[in-house]
Amino acid sequence: MTPKLATAVFLAGAILAPAASWAAGSSATQGSGSTQASGSMMNETKAAMSDTAITAKVKAKLATDRDVHSGDITVSTERGAVKLGGTAQSQQDADKAVDIAKATDGVTSVDNGIKVESGAAKY
């Protein structure tokens, strides 16, 4: 297994396993007469869990895509809106990262804040 693939599998498992566990447990408590405030809190928690899952999916796809050198690309998600940041080795890598994020289930929009390395020697 390649290091990129191993990292992607680990990230996906670490993020998605708690979300699946939480989702299974929350369905058992529905209908227990929770108040409006706790319902709102549950919706916020579900949104946060969904955002975490989206971030994990995008990171996993970036890590396993052979055409993208994604080591310095950052990913964050808020209410389905993905924000990409960090640096890419080329404009092609940055564009591919945007395409990958847009094609991920649950993503409502993508904000591309990726900077392309100039290629100049770093001192």
Image (cartoon, rainbow, N blue to C red):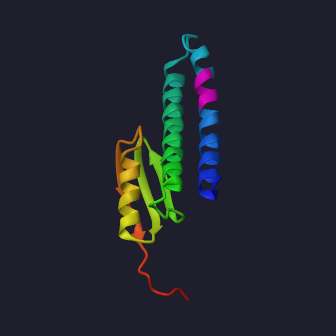
- Between 122 and 27, the one nearer to me in the picture: 122
Q: How many marks?
A: 0
Stretch of the chain drawn in magenta: 20-24
* Residue at 47% from the left image edge and 66% from the top image edge: 86
Going by the image, does 117 lie left or right of 13? left
Q: Position of residue 33 (x, y in %)?
A: 55, 11
Residue, x 36% and y 53% (percent of image)? 99
Vertical order, 90 against 80 (above or below): below
- 87 in relation to 44, above or below: below
Q: Is residue 72 above or below residue 53?
A: below
The residue lying toward the viewer, choosing from 50 and 6, is 6
Looking at this view, name the residue that lies furthest to the front: 1
Horizontal relation, residue 106 to residue 14: left or right: left
Q: Is residue 100 magenta?
A: no
Q: Residue at x 54, y 36 (%)?
A: 49
**Percent x, y of residue 32:** 58, 11
The residue sitting at 64% across, 34% down in the picture is: 18
The quarter of the displayed image where residue 78 is located: top left
Q: Nearer the viewer, residue 64 or 31?
A: 64
Camera-nearest residue between 21 and 41: 21
Quadrant including the C terminus: bottom right
Residue 2 in the image: x percent, y percent?
A: 63, 56
With respect to residue 121, does 8 lie above or below? above
From the top left corner, tell me how far across and down residue 91 is, in percent.
36, 69
Q: Main secondary structure of the magenta part?
A: helix
